[in-house]
Amino acid sequence: MSTATQPDDRTARARIRDAALVCFARDGFSTPLRSIAQEAGVSVPLITHHYKTKDALRQTCDEWVLDRFLELKLLAIHTPDSVKESLADTSSASVLTVYIVRSFLDATSSARRFFDRYMDQLRTIIATARAAGMVNPSVDEEEQLHLLATQSIGTLMVEFVLHPPEDPTLFVDQVFTSRNMTAYMEIYSQPLLAPSPAMDTYLTSIKEKP
Amino acid sequence: MSTATQPDDRTARARIRDAALVCFARDGFSTPLRSIAQEAGVSVPLITHHYKTKDALRQTCDEWVLDRFLELKLLAIHTPDSVKESLADTSSASVLTVYIVRSFLDATSSARRFFDRYMDQLRTIIATARAAGMVNPSVDEEEQLHLLATQSIGTLMVEFVLHPPEDPTLFVDQVFTSRNMTAYMEIYSQPLLAPSPAMDTYLTSIKEKP
DNA sequence: ACACATCCTGTACATTCGTACAGTATTTAA
DNA sequence: TTAAATACTGTACGAATGTACAGGATGTGT
């Protein structure tokens, strides 16, 4: 309540970064600097004064999101425990999620860094879940991890394209509905494909080959 | 062989459309009209002569890809039979696939049309596979279909971002490697999550609710 | 009080891009 | 053959955008 009436605590440099983060998440990285300046309440040249170029400003935002990446436990929705966690803190992490999805939609190198970071995060989660007997073993666990990470990020991307949120804050609430979670739980707990001779021979063959 | 020496059979209008298709797939929809003109070997105003605006040109390409959509059986990789089919015709369908992925990366309304079309296609495939006993039943089959379609397109998107092909022709060969297919087969034929009391109660609860 | 660094703004420039316009060649129709 | 429609090009204009430059306001150290 005390900070509510204060105009703005943050320095202009931080205000610009936050404004850029919001604009990038909401409108994509092709957002004009003029929009960011308006969002931050400053002039355009002040942006180039603090951050030399637009690319440098974006890099700063990337690093900032990368530092906050641990907040995004909700991306790891593959264990039923983490599902409940995801329902806790949404709005702050939602903007980060949308920002990352935007990075992937932009198809630049920063997406690769986010992906690597996410695989690291998911690796430990699945490892502990496997140790607890909650996750079954795999023929090639690293390759399976790669597929799970790809499916997770990809699902977010498609969901974002199909139902773009007017407010980036609401994205994760919009994605992880109970209807979606049902399909998620089922697809990962019960086999989709029925056992067949062809499938069995294929699966046993890849188990023998390294 | 006979057509190899002929300069170009196609009318300029068709050449422009094909060039736009290639440029859009390779460089994205922000490709300048000048690049398309160069690729087609014509002047820029000729493009605006045949297709009034750039958006109209893109719409024409969208319709053209939508008409050729049935060639893309390879997107339906969820049954082991269709896997073998996918190894047949690649290069022609690969450009279409990359074009569609670009549409999703662009996050415009045309992506929705592609998605609906793909769900229709996948629906019949899974229905026949289910009738043949190859695919197990689901609690909410339409919702499961939606998830499978989302995962398929999303996987293509992430794969495209992580390993962008220098030549759009080679994308599908690059994606559907045997290493990837192994993980695919396993994730859809053997449960990832081990049965647990919490999971069982969750699954039985959603089976009773409509 | 003064010099100086920092913060900040207004203006302007260069580039890129889609599109419009005027005009020329080429094909078609009568 | 002639007139008209069609295909095609060169030039240029207007809008959007990132960035550079000059200058003013503000605070800070001596």
Image (cartoon, coloured by chain):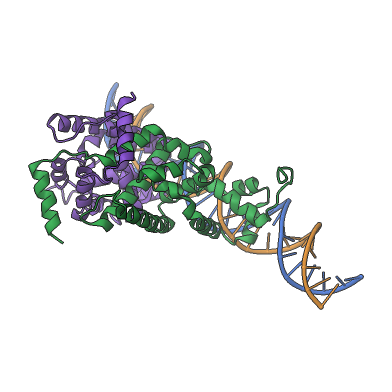
Chain colours: A purple, B green, C orange, D blue
Residue B147 position, x and y percent, is 29, 51
Tally of numbered tags = 0
Give left or right: position of B27 versus B190. right
Query: In the rendered image, which quarter is residue C4 located in?
Result: top left
* Residue most extreme to the front: A197
Image point (56%, 57%), residue name: B57
Give left or right: position of B138 versus A164. left
The residue nearer to you, when weighing B177 against B42, is: B177
Image point (54%, 59%), residue name: B60
Query: In the rendered image, which quarter is residue A135 located in?
Result: top left
Give left or right: position of A30 versus A80. right
The residue nearer to you, when weighing C17 against A148, is: A148
Image point (14%, 50%), residue name: B203
Query: In the rendered image, which quarter is residue A147 located in?
Result: top left
Give left or right: position of B46 versus C25. left
Q: Is residue A13 visible?
A: no
Image point (39%, 33%), residue name: B178
Please say if A121 is above or below A7: above
Q: Is residue B107 visible?
A: yes
Residue C14 position, x and y percent, is 58, 41
The residue nearer to you, when weighing C16 against B185, is: B185
Quarter of the picture containing the C terminus of chain A is top left
Residue B190 position, x and y percent, is 24, 39
